[in-house]
Amino acid sequence: MNALDPITFAVIKSGLDTIVDDMAYAVMRTARSPIVRDVLDYSVTICDAEGRILSQAKTVALHLGAVPDAIEVVRSRFAGDLFPGDVIVLNDPYDGGMHLPDIFMFKPIFAGERLLGFSVVIAHHCDVGGRVPGSNASDSTEIFQEGLRIAPMKLYERGRPNRTLLTIIEKNVRLPELVLGDLDAQYATCNIGEREMLRLFERHGDELERYFDRLIDYGEALTRKAIASWPDGEYRFTDYIDGDGFSLAPIPIVCCITVKGDHLWVDFTGSSPQVKGAINATLSFVKSATYLTIRCALDHDVPNNAGVYRCITVTAPEGSILNPRMPAPVAARALTGYRVVDTVMGALAQIAPKKLMAAGEGGNTVVAIGGYHGEPPKPFVFVDMINGAWGGRADKDGVEGITNPSQNMSNLPIETIEARYPLLMEEYALRPDSGGAGEFRGGLGLVRQYRLLAESAVLQLRADRHEHSPYGLFGGGPAASSRNLIDRGAGFEVLPAKVTLEIGKDTVIRHEQAGGGGWGDPQRRARPAIEADIANGKVTPEAAAKDYGSKR
Amino acid sequence: MTHSARLSVDIGGTFTDLVLLRSDGASFSAKVSSTPEAPEDALVIGMLEVLAAAELRPDGLTEVLHGTTVGSNTLLQKLGARCGLITTRGFRDVLEIGRLRTPGMFDLTWDKPEPLVARRYRLEATERVRADGTVMTPLRLDDVLAAGRFFAAEGIESVAICFLNSYKNPVHERQAATAFAEAFPGIAVTASVDVLPEAGEYERTSTTAVNAYVLPPLRGYLTRLEQKLRAHGVTAPLLIGNSNGGLSSARVAQQKPVFFISSGRSSGAVGALRLGAATDEANLVAFDMGGTTASAALIHRGVLARTHEYEFRAGMSVPSRFIKAGGYMMRVPTVDVAEVGNGAGSIAAIDPAGLLTVGPRSAGAAPGPVCYGRGGTQPTVTDANVVLGLLPPRLAGGSLSLDIAAARAAIDRQLAQPLGLSIEAAAYGIREIANANMVRAIRAVTVERGLDPRDLTLLAFGGSGPVHAADLARTLGITRVLFPPSPGVFTAMGMLAGTVEHHELRALAGRLDRVDAAEVVALSAEMQRAAVAQLTAQGYPAAAIACSYEIDLRLDGQDAALSIPFDRFDAAVLRPAFIAAYRDSYGYTPTDAVEAVALRLHARAQNSEPLDFRALKAGDPGDGEANAARREVHFGRGGAQLTPVLRRAAVTGAIDGPVIIEGPDTTIVIPSGARVAPNATGSLVATLEPVR
């Protein structure tokens, strides 16, 4: 252990895990908007003075892998200009961010004069302005339509709030109380990270940073050990996004993983050029999606720190959908992140099948409904994210009613929605027959149905997997495709996967989500499992006859 | 003269602990082996034992207090009733979908536990209540009756009913429950409004489903227990410890078992609260360490920390309590206990990257630690403590000699050699890592609330708590450690000190500065009337009932509230009190509007003969040898120290560490730099040098 004390090492490791736990809890307790406090679309981490991640909380994984690039921007922009009490925010995808609703906050932690590290909190804000409520539309064509861009700036300077920046934010978002309230929650959480890190420093003194190095080395060692055990070679996989909202042309995501010794190269050459619609993803976000998927193939006790990233090199051609040029729109880029996860998963399943799964639902479906309601009319912005199903696995069925593994998000309670928004919820259920057939069936997707009670509103839907349904593996079948449906009073009609439109009172919107793909030959599925699915109405007798015919 | 007595029984997985408190103040305790197949058998055996010791007949008992793990075991081992659920059309999957999160990340092999009610037994009724409580679609009773016929045919024993927005208007749930109970008297029914009239359909449905699931087994157990007690001539009422650490009649436990899942564990925390009150310790961390887990609860300014919801999971990982994932969610008032999977039986091992780890796997009672010689081969925390000389070479009572050589060999081969450490260094490492894990539980109930553990006293109990407490205190900077009389049966003792409780809740809505003080007064009076009526019906005189009030406040738009106690409602006083509490927790001072969410009343009825910690004598006379004088003990990595070993009864004045104090039920470890002395209530108090 390089002359470091193994016991102190374990104590510091668990101390850092406790700090990020404390921080994650604080966000949930102090946030104002349902998307943060109920859906838990936020993440927290602690970095060392060089910006290396030391420990991550069990929050949205897709955010966390983008922290290294973001903090690099902060460290170079504010070199020599960071002081105790400073707090930096940013959201610009072309300057350290991912998409505008995700506001990063960094607080440098100083022990006296000395920089020890950073508290980092990323939260998805319910609105950052722009042309569509929720600032998340997939049919914008330039970043300038997507809302307020914040380059890395000090929100607090030596403890004093930057009123200018706060006022600009306040004037440019639809729901300033919620946005400023959630920024307060981020700030409170940064302070908790700072306080706890300083306590750790008080206890361990100058030794602490040596242990940080060792902790990162430890993450690297475990990762290299796992990679070294994988057979050298090139592993390829291609998956598709249905279209960008303007064109129905399939958008390929192509990945090639090269295993050589104890290092991985993941290259996305061959993926689509950047597209007109807002599903372009920054390279930092693509790295994040790639890291987290590879992390799933490692043992569970590998610490989630910068050491893991050292073993992985991610590349994507400039000007592609995975590394776009300014001013390409990016608001709905999460979708592309999910497909990167699915694509990397498909390649990795050839390497470490026991730890992976067939494709899940393909990422959450976003349903945003915004407008004015009440007397006098007040603005409302409802953002719902529908999750999810996992694909079948090497020895068991896919989980249903579950977060996408790239996140760790929750759902909005029906009773919260109805109490706060002019909506009536008509169904929230598992969708029978939506899981792909297989020896191990894919999980069922979900159904969510809403009725608008306000006079009118703007509806924005971001779905996918209408055309290219989640794949099965090793002989397992694909899942059912997703569907967006609308009933304006004359029965249900099918809507495109990505759409923004005006709707009137009593319009019913229904999303039927794709399920997870199946794993293994359906003919090998155990008879009791088929019978239990039929008894529980998860698989209809007709579908069972079709998929598992010879068993019946 | 003839005495009466109160009896308290805590049934755990391995031992059933009993404490009898006679009306003259004398106390008697017993520890007998548990009988998991029929837990009441061990209770009766132990009861007869302590009655004999106290020279009392069964009809001399005035109260039997009981902490039971039947509820938690039913959930843990999935032994509950065959259950059905009737819910609003369109929403039968709410229970199975849950809140979507996973307890860990990056683990695609994880499985969500089976829902307590299978999908085929989750049926829907046409009905709808809007979010404002108005009825949109009347209940179709035929749907309820058709469900009942199906359930009856399928052998369903217990049914939960939960409709959307019933917390605003329970009319449909009441209609459905009444009609169902009349038509199907053989099937138990739980309506969600009777267990949790609060918003949040998943939490409410889940809480109701747990109630339905646990109800038949717990009702059956308590019925059998009462019959056995009556058959042995016990006439006293049976009171059950609830998850909130209070006591309720067995009848309540039979109807609302979901409030009794953490029955025993919470009683230990309440015992800590009472002991603290008796010894003027207003700020305590109650630390309980058993065979497989360790837990911590917080008493701050004389108030025991409680929470309004928790999740029952087979595997524990507690500091991340906020994750709603993969457990059976219950939103019921519960003592806020943080638990980690680290106890005396936790196994030590080396992970693939060479890091020493301890727990959460445990050797349990079987095969047990290596030194027990009962087949255990993997070194445990107990083995490490034996090798270090911290534990005596014989188990309590002298019944079992410990195989120190086997423990040394196991640690040497499996840990010390691969790590390149001496046997003692490896053993010390096990202990240190176990301590680091247990520190997380303590931090979860202190640091997470912005409290500095250094301002607190650590109260150590459970079979192994006193073996580790001084080291934990040092790590956290705590300078006072309290060892109660009879730490090993402290939880049973806690119940004797407990009160019968009743809680009321009324919703408030709107800004704090606009709350009508007259309305608060009226609601408070109404809650007080309801609580007093409940408790007087259980036989407590109004004079023995004490009421306290809290108001739940939060910043406008937040979900989570802080409960702020008050005597007289005054918004101008409550706002700064809330802001101060908020700043303590989250490190900044908000300037936003404050919203009032709910009023809470806590009513407590004090038994006329509660256990008085001030009057307790230190532990039972043990049957161990006389003071073993001295042995070699490793307190750290600096080598062994020849250390005095005393029997607890022999500690009559202040003693400087290092010293090992052996009692009949546990061993107290006092390192050097600490001083230990008995206090007036039979506890030992260790004072540690402040760090730095």
Image (cartoon, coloured by chain):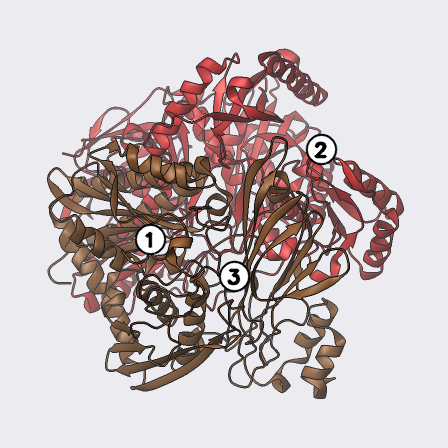
Chain colours: A brown, B red
Amino acid type, label 2 = Gly
**SS state under label 1:** helix
Q: Is residue A302 left or right of residue A12?
A: right
Residue B498: percent from left, percent from top: 54, 27
Disc 2 or disc 3, which is closer to the eye?
3
A331 left or right, relative to B82: left
Q: Secondary structure at mark 3?
A: loop
Q: For mark 2, what is the residue?
A: B233
Q: Amino acid at mark 3?
A: Asn
Of badges 1 and 2, nearer the viewer stands 1
Label 3 neighbourhood size at 10 Å, few (<14), some (14-19), many (20+)? many
Q: Which mark is residue A364?
A: 3
Whole-number angstrom distance, CA of label 1 to CA of label 3: 48 Å
Label placed on residue B382: 1
Q: Please give the name of the residue rendered at 70% of the width and 44% of the height, measured from the top-left corner.
A: B164
Question: Which sits in the foreground, A347 or A419?
Answer: A419
The residue under label 1 is which amino acid type?
Thr
Q: Chain of mark 3?
A: A
Residue A376 in the image: above or below residue A451: above
What SS does tag 2 mark? loop
Q: Look at the image and tell me whether residue B385 can be seen.
A: no
Could you tell me residue B447's position as x and y percent?
Answer: 33, 37
**Contact (Cβ within 8 Å) of mark 1 with mark 3:** no
Quarter of the image with the C terminus of chain A in it? bottom right
When asked about the image quadrant of residue B573, the answer is top left
Residue A75: horizontal and vertical position, in percent?
A: 18, 52
Query: What is the chain letter for disc 1?
Result: B
Chain letter, disc 2 residue = B
